[in-house]
């Protein structure tokens, strides 16, 4: 039987919307042999109910096709059983472009509403096609208040159940909270054993903002040595528990009370990642985990990197 992923109620969401603590990431990887449609369909079969997409990933169409297929196959009886997140790209971070951009995402996903929409990065560029990395010469001023007011409008229009942000520092969240009439439900940021983000997590907890950890295995965008998956301390812990390093990483996030989005398009690893809800880490594990070198993996989406993106946090 598929394990049931625990859920949490999202703050300031319409209708007590619940978010499964673990979601499937869908950021594209050149090496993946499985299509997003097939991966999402397989994930639904295995019991995943939360999917993390973004306009910039170019996967919204495939995620939508998989959902339609899952309904047709009777894997789910209603779209309401799923929690679907998407993110607005920096080209749309203009107050007047937010509502049309979200409507475009919904059309591509073939959905009537999203569960959560996030501002992908606290950066605005000139409107236009997605470019990655972002060319700094395209950057214009980020009107946080105007953009957030338009997101609030999206929620009021019923286009999304909840609104949130991604890659926001404490300083940026503090600024946002000064004018938000609907506070952000979520801040999606990098959190993994190699970048544990204690300060930001404590701040979000105090303010009632759910943290969703991305790159929980520190793997998706990394090339070369991986501080987590190639870590000898974690290998030892994994062996002692009869688990994999990935499972140790995900279990730790779960025990921190975080939500997280992990990407695997491989059937076995997808299943392995679900097997983390019925065992625990020990005090000794925590001692060892505190020795892991800390360093941010995803330093920013621009080329060159921006000096002030993380506000020195
Ligand atoms: P990740 O989930 O930490 O790692 C994904 C990689 O790990 C894939 O190459 C996957 O390969 C492999 N993997 C998964 N499970 C495994 C296991 N049990 N054992 C060994 N390898 C395993 O990294 P991520 O994709 O960067 O982050 C996850 C999601 O977070 C993204 O897909 C995206 O949705 C979101 N994200 C958001 C932002 C943002 O700015 N908001 C930034 C980055 C990521 P296989 O598919 O072959 O298993």
Image (cartoon, grey):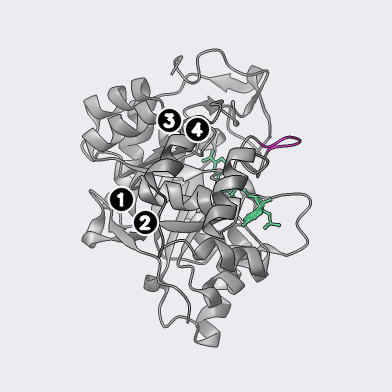
Q: Which residues are magenta?
A: 222-226
Q: Which residue bears the numbered disc 2?
A: 159
- 4 or 1: tag closer to the N-terminus: 4
Q: Position of residue 100 (x, y in %)?
A: 46, 47
Q: Which residue bears the numbered disc 4?
A: 121
Looking at the image, residue 47 sits to the left or right of residue 11; the answer is right
Residue at image point 49% right, 45% down: 87
Q: Is residue 223 magenta?
A: yes
Q: Position of residue 266 (x, y in %)?
A: 68, 64
Residue at image point 35% right, 26% down: 199
Mark 4 CB within 8 Å of ligand 1: yes
Question: Could you tell me which secondary element the residue under label 3 belongs to?
Answer: loop
Query: What whole-number distance in Å separates the C-alpha atoms at marks 1 and 2?
Result: 6 Å
Which disc number belongs to residue 197? 3
Q: Which residue bears the numbered disc 1?
A: 155
* Cβ atoms at labels 2 and 3 below 8 Å apart: no
Which disc number belongs to residue 45? none
- 3 or 1: tag closer to the N-terminus: 1
Circle 4 crowding by C-alpha within 10 Å: few under 14, some 14–19, many from 20: many
């Amino acid at each position: 039987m598929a394990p049931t992923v625990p859920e949490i109620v999202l703050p300031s969401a319409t209708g007590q919307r619940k978010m499964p603590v673990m979601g499937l990431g869908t950021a594209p990887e050149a090496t993946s042999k499985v299509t997003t449609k097939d991966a999402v369909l397989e994930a639904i079969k295995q019991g995943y109910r939360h999917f993390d997409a973004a306009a910039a990933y170019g996967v919204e169409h495939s995620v939508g096709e998989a959902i339609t297929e899952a309904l047709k196959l009777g894997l789910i009886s209603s779209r309401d059983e799923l929690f679907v997140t998407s993110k607005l790209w920096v080209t749309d971070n203009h107050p007047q472009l937010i509502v049309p951009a979200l409507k475009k995402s919904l059309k591509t996903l073939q959905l009537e509403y999203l569960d959560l929409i996030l501002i992908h990065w606290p950066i605005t560029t000139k409107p236009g096609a997605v470019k990655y990395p972002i060319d700094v010469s395209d950057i214009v001023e980020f009107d946080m208040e105007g953009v957030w007011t338009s997101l609030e409008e999206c929620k009021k229009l019923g286009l999304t159940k909840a609104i949130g942000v991604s890659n926001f520092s404490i300083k940026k969240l503090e600024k946002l909270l000064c004018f938000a009439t609907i506070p952000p439900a979520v801040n999606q940021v990098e959190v993994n054993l190699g970048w544990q983000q204690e300060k930001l997590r404590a701040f979000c907890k105090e303010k009632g903002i759910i943290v969703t950890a991305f790159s929980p295995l520190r793997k998706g965008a990394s090339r070369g040595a991986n501080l987590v998956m190639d870590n000898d301390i974690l290998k030892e812990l994994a062996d002692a528990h009869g688990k994999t390093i990935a499972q140790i990483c995900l279990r730790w996030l779960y025990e921190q009370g975080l939500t997280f989005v992990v990407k695997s398009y491989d059937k076995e690893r997808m299943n392995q990642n679900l097997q983390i809800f019925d065992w625990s880490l020990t005090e000794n594990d925590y001692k060892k985990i505190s020795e892991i070198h800390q360093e941010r993996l995803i330093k920013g989406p621009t080329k060159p990197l921006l000096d002030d993106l993380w506000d020195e946090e």
